[in-house]
Amino acid sequence: MAKLFVFTIVLLLISGIIAEDDEKLSHDQDFSDGEEKVVAYTSPILSGFAYLAEHFDDQDSFSRNWIKSEAKKEGIDEEIAKYDGTWAIEEPIRSVQNGDLGLVLKSTARHAAISSLLNKPFVFNDKPLIVQYEVYLQEGQECGGAYLKLLTEDSNGKIDLKKFHDKTPYTIMFGPDKCGNDHKLHFIFRHKNPLNGTIEEKHCKKPKDRLEDFFKDKLPHLYTLIVRPDNTFTIKIDNKIINEGSLLDDFQPPVNPPLEIEDPNDKQPEDWDDREKIPDPSKVKPDDWDEDAPAQIVDENDKMPDDWLEDEPINIPNPDSVKPDDWDIEIDGEWEPPEIANPKCENAPGCGPYKQKLIDNPRFKGKWRAPLINNVNYKGKWKPRLIHNPDYFNDVNPFKMMPIRAIGFELWSISGNILFDNLIITDDEATAKKWADDTFEIRRNKIARESWSVWNQLVNFTSENPWIWAVYIIVAFIPVLLIVYCCCFSTQDSMEDTYPTKEFDNGNDVDPLDDESPGDVLPETPEQSPRENEAAPESENDVDSDNINETDQVVESEEKDENLGDTDGPRRRKPNKE
Ligand SMILES: *[C@@H]1O[C@H](CO)[C@@H](O)[C@H](O)[C@H]1NC(C)=O
């Protein structure tokens, strides 16, 4: 087949060029482009002060500073209440840099909690709080959190990290969280009511950007929260601003309650006339208005068609029917043949007594109603009066949150192998920026280089060898040539073309001709995966199954409804139904 021949030639040509290009560039690399050089990984060095800066590269320091929780979750079955999820310090699955380790949540569908004290408590004063860390959802995320909690220093300054659990008081919760189609980036702070000391969660408004990709692209992402003494905040992902605003204006429920509220004791007075319009009392029903006239009357002009068979019944006893032999008049009663439609009516307009058609009654008027006029006594819609809100307060500086003593992850996730890295808590934006430049940005560049290197080589080669454009143009025209060839010359080839040709069948070793019915073999798409019909991940049955983390096959729509009614709160995932 000629077209196959042409195609193969072109493929060979292209692969030859790329191979040559590869060789050329690997020679060039060391000289031309300093950026391209592979630099050995070194752990980042902190450039300023931090309350905590953790790169997780040092196992010893990790074991000294991080405490795994041994707590139990309150109010659920003993068996699954334990914080027995597993953590590891290890390299990422992909984009490995020798010696660059991270904290990895290994286990799936188990409660896991781990935490570490800050070097010194963070007290909200005149400096901003910056929290920043990398999250690498190496297997994507089906349902689970990857957020952190900044734990509140309690009154006696002590905190027992071994007992860290879901109810441990926190000051701020920050980070990604997802279940089904509900993608979140939490920023919750706990605000103390200055009147009575009650603590209430304040949830940040949602970011406008779509967050889906951060959960499914299986790439590391950098999450940054900045809260400033002027009560503004900024949230960034990968150094791009995703959300910003004010602690006073952009949280639900609002920090400060309204000054006035509707008086719950106020009632609508009995004589309050809230009818805006009333029937005109000066109008009476006209004498000729017949309320009883029917809506429809018989059409006296309607005549029975001439060929209407008035004397023929619509149904007749079936003449072909015979009384069954075992019919017992005593038990079954008198036998009557079943009825069938009268065959004589088949070609007539109708049979039986004729009924004249109905038409609309011109005299029909219906019930008389007086026209509406404005009500002179109308007082407007009644509303309870406003009174001073007894719970009112005005906290002008919600930035002054409860001091932070420790940081912790308290998580539950369907997808495993969540890697955390390069965590920093500081009061200086430049320090956090430098820390990210030395860690996240290097990794991001490495990933970008890896995924674009083939493309870049092609681009470089093209700019150095403009003649290659001729090849590109030929390649671009091949489909056109093939189509023209097929349409005009291939009539006697058509039988051969019915089956896919093996050479075109990328990576598939099975000869399609061996298959009895090649047309029936459909590629398995994620939508058709068997997981689609499984129970939602929060259901009882799924909790301990180990094959849950096949996140590639998540079918999001199935789980859509699960958390729609949810508040933005830290989701208390309880695998058993409570
Ligand atoms: C404190 O006040 C809030 C209303 O502002 C109220 O909801 C809460 O129940 C109060 N707490 C106590 C302990 O009285």
Image (tube, grey):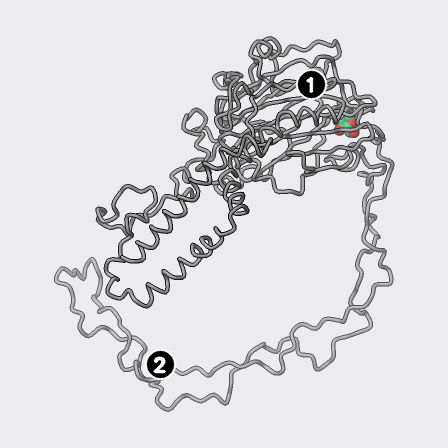
Residue on which the image places disc 2: 352
Q: Nearer the viewer, residue 125 or 83?
A: 125
Secondary structure at numbered mark 2: loop
Residue on which the image places disc 1: 46
Q: Amino acid at mark 1?
A: Leu
Q: Is residue 71 left or right of residue 174?
A: left
- For the point 57% across and 18% down, which residue is it? 113
Is the residue 363 above or below the residue 145 in the image? below
Q: Considering only order in the chain, which callout, 2 or 1, is on the residue closer to the N terminus?
A: 1
Which x, y percent locates residue 11? 37, 48
Q: Nearer the viewer, residue 45 or 368?
A: 45
Q: Residues within 10 Å of mark 1 (few under 14, many from 20)?
A: some
Labels 1, 2: front one: 1
Outermost residue on the left side: it is: 325
Which x, y percent locates residue 115? 62, 16
Outermost residue on the bottom side: it is: 306
For the N terminus, which image quadrant? bottom left
Q: Nearer the viewer, residue 267 or 49?
A: 49
Is the residue 433 above or below the residue 558 in the image? above
Q: Nearer the viewer, residue 86 or 346?
A: 86
Secondary structure at numbered mark 1: loop
- For the point 41% across and 47% down, which residue is it? 14
Q: Amino acid at mark 2?
A: Gly
For disc 2, does the CB lie below 8 Å from ligand 1?
A: no
Which x, y percent locates residue 31? 56, 31
Q: Is residue 163 left or right of residue 280?
A: left
Q: Is residue 255 left or right of residue 361?
A: right
